Amino acid sequence: KRGIDLEHLANLRDPRAYDREAVISNVTRQVEGLTGDAGIMSKVSDGELMIVGAFYEMSIGIVDFVSEVSQTAEPSEFSETAEQPSDDVSTASSDHEEVPSPQQSPKAKGVVIVPK
């Protein structure tokens, strides 16, 4: 439960909103955890790798990109609490992107590590 705002979650009435907030908090924590790995961050700094935290909403076929850690990403509100590993690496986020359909897309939620 580390990183989850339990007071905020307690005020949510819609069970789907509660689940979504919990998943997004988890994705954010996982991305932050990966930025603590020197080997991963070395590859990010060298431009060989980027880390993308995302949430796939299977029922509507939309992917919400929570955060990105890459060599060229612009800083965002999601990265304010995360420590920057170096001046060459930054984090960013975007709202969401529609995908064709749940049948054509991976049915996964979480952190994606993208080799460049």
Image (cartoon, rainbow, N blue to C red):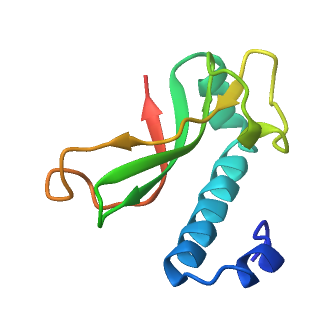
Residue 99: image quadrant is top left
Q: Position of residue 24 (x, y in %)?
A: 60, 60
- Identify the residue shown where x is 81% and y is 22%: 86
Compared with 62, 23 (above or below) is: below
Residue 105 lies left or right of residue 87; in this view the side is left
Instruction: Residue lying at the far left in this picture: please name it.
Output: 103
- Identify the residue shown where x is 22% and y is 51%: 105
Residue 9: image quadrant is bottom right
- Identify the residue shown where x is 76% and y is 44%: 36
Instruction: Residue lying at the far front in this picture: please name it.
Output: 13
Numbered circles on residues, count: 0
- Identify the residue shown where x is 55% and y is 35%: 94
Q: Quadrant of the N terminus?
A: bottom right
Q: Position of residue 50 (x, y in %)?
A: 54, 30
Compared with 14, 106 (above or below) is: above
Residue 7 lies left or right of residue 22; in this view the side is right
Q: Quadrant of the C terminus?
A: top left
Compared with 102, 47 (above or below) is: above
Residue 2: image quadrant is bottom right
Compared with 29, 4 (above or below) is: below
Q: Position of residue 65 (x, y in %)?
A: 50, 43
